[in-house]
Image (spheres, rainbow, N blue to C red):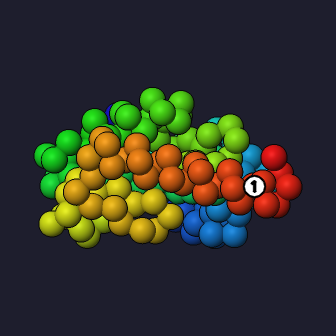
Amino acid sequence: MQAPPTDQLHSKLIPMLQEIQERLGYIAPEAVEWLAKELKLSEQEIYGVATFYNFFRLNPPGRHEIRVCLGTACHVQGNEKLLDTICERLGIQPGETTPDGRYSLERVACVGACALAPAIVIDDEVHGRMTQRALQRLLDKIDREDEEAMKKRGEK
Ligand code: FES
C-alpha cells in the first residue's frame, strides 16, 4: 500500500484539490501544473496525494456517472460481479471515463441503501436489487436516450 502523504502536504493540498474538483469536476493536469508552481512542489508529489485519496478524480466526469457500491451489504450481494460487467461493457476501469465522454465509473462505499443491496447509483439515482439483466437493460436505456439527445442536438 502507498504511504500516506505527510501532514504538511496533506493540510495544504487537500482543500486546494477539493476546490479544484468542485470547480472543474476533476483534477485537471493544468491545475496540477499551476498548484506545483504555486506551492513549489513537484507535480509528482501532487499526484501522489491526489491518487492516495480515492475521492479525487483525475479524469473529466462523463455525462453519466455510474457509482457502484462496494459497501459490505452490496459486496455480499455480488456487486463486484456487476462492477466487472460494467467494466467489460464500457471498456473502462473505476476512476476512468469512456473515450466518448458518455460514462464515468467509480467504486464507492455504502450509499445508504443497504436494504436494496446490491445498489448502483447512476446520475444520483439509486438503483437497488440490481441484477445482471436489469443492469444491461438500464445501460441500454441510457445509451438509447443519450443517442436520441445527441441526434436532436445535431451531434450525430
Ligand atoms: S452497502 Fe451498498 S448501500 Fe449500503
Along the viewing direction, whichever of 41 and 61 lies nearer the viewer: 61
Tell me where residue 121 sits by quadrant.
Answer: bottom left
Disc 1 marks which residue? 150
State the image coordinates of residue 129 (x, y, percent, origin top left).
Answer: 22, 57
Along the horizontal axis of the image, is 13 left or right of 136?
Answer: right
Q: Nearer the viewer, residue 104 or 143?
A: 143
* 22 w.r.t. 31: above or below: below
Task: Characterize the local packing of mark 1: few (<14), some (14-19) or many (20 or more) Cα atoms within 10 angstroms.
Answer: few
Tell which residue pokes out farthest to the right in this image: 154
Residue at 28%, 36% in the rendered image: 81
**Above or below, 107 relative to 15:** above
Q: Is residue 152 in sight in this rendering?
A: yes
> Would you say the beta carbon of the disc 1 residue lies within 8 angstroms of ligand 1?
no
Quadrant where the N terminus lies?
top left
Label tally: 1
- Determine the residue positioned at 79% across, 61% down: 152
Measured from the top left, where is residue 84 in percent x and y? Answer: 36, 33
Residue at the location (53% across, 30% down)?
91
Residue 112 in percent (x, y) is at 25, 70
Q: Is residue 29 left or right of residue 123?
A: right
User: How far across and down, in percent of the image, does residue 130 sit?
Assistant: 27, 52
Residue 70 in sight here:
no
- Secondary element at tag 1: helix
- Type of residue at label 1? Met
- Residue at horizontal 46 percent and vertical 68 percent from the top: 124
